[in-house]
Image (tube, rainbow, N blue to C red):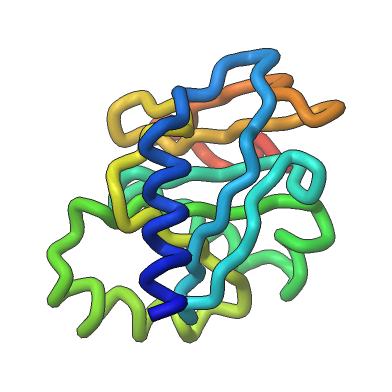
Amino acid sequence: MLKKLLILTFITTISFANILKIGDTLTPFSIPDQFDELHTINSEKYQTVIVSFSKESSTKVNDFLQKQEKHFLKNNNIVYISDIHKMPSIITWLFALPKMKKFDYKVMLLYKENTVFPQNNKDLSIIRFKNNKVSSIEFIKENESIDSIFN
């Protein structure tokens, strides 16, 4: 019951939010990871938010992260969010989640349509924060490398 209440709170928070723009402050919210543990996302804890909106962009992030040191995200104040709201539930529970649970890093999961993070088609979104405000928004296209944004 508590889990459902927390997820409802997350959905409500996301539902009334606006898409982030340069200069905006991120309203803290909670979101589950692939182990169904809730994490609070805020710009004080995370300086960079990576959001994937497609299987292709998610694969790009996962390929990149699997080549990094074990605590790359944590050590660099980065949170990775995967928007899986369009994925059929049966696929999520039978295939996607078991695969994600093998990762050495946390993947936060958007189960409902994104209403907070800037999105450009299926591109990967990179939102950076400075002094608790959005300082930059980048979109990495399918044919572009993610490596360059962290070097």
**Viewer-proximal residue among 40 and 62:** 40
**Viewer-proximal residue among 150 and 13:** 13
Q: Is residue 38 left or right of residue 26?
A: left
Say if 55 sits above or below 3 in the image.
above
Question: Can you say which quadrant of the picture contains the N terminus?
Answer: bottom left
Q: Is residue 63 left or right of residue 78?
A: left
Say if 115 sits above or below 109 in the image.
above
Q: Is residue 124 left or right of residue 73?
A: left
Say if 2 sits above or below 22 in the image.
below
**Viewer-proximal residue among 24 and 148:** 24
Q: Which quadrant of the figure has residue 3?
A: bottom left
**Viewer-proximal residue among 38 and 80:** 38
Residue shown at the point (29%, 28%) measured from the top left: 121
> From where the camera sits, is residue 59 visible?
no
Q: Position of residue 12 (x, y in %)?
A: 39, 45
Q: Position of residue 54 (x, y in %)?
A: 30, 47
Q: Position of residue 18 (x, y in %)?
A: 45, 24
Residue shown at the point (61%, 72%) measured from the top left: 105
Residue shown at the point (56%, 16%) measured from the top left: 21
Residue shown at the point (21%, 84%) measured from the top left: 94
> From where the camera sits, is residue 36 visible?
yes
Q: Is residue 4 left or right of residue 28?
A: left
Say if 35 sits above or below 68 in the image.
below
Q: Position of residue 50 (x, y in %)?
A: 56, 44
Question: Can you say which quadrant of the picture contains the C terminus?
Answer: top right
Q: Which quadrant of the figure has residue 143?
A: top left
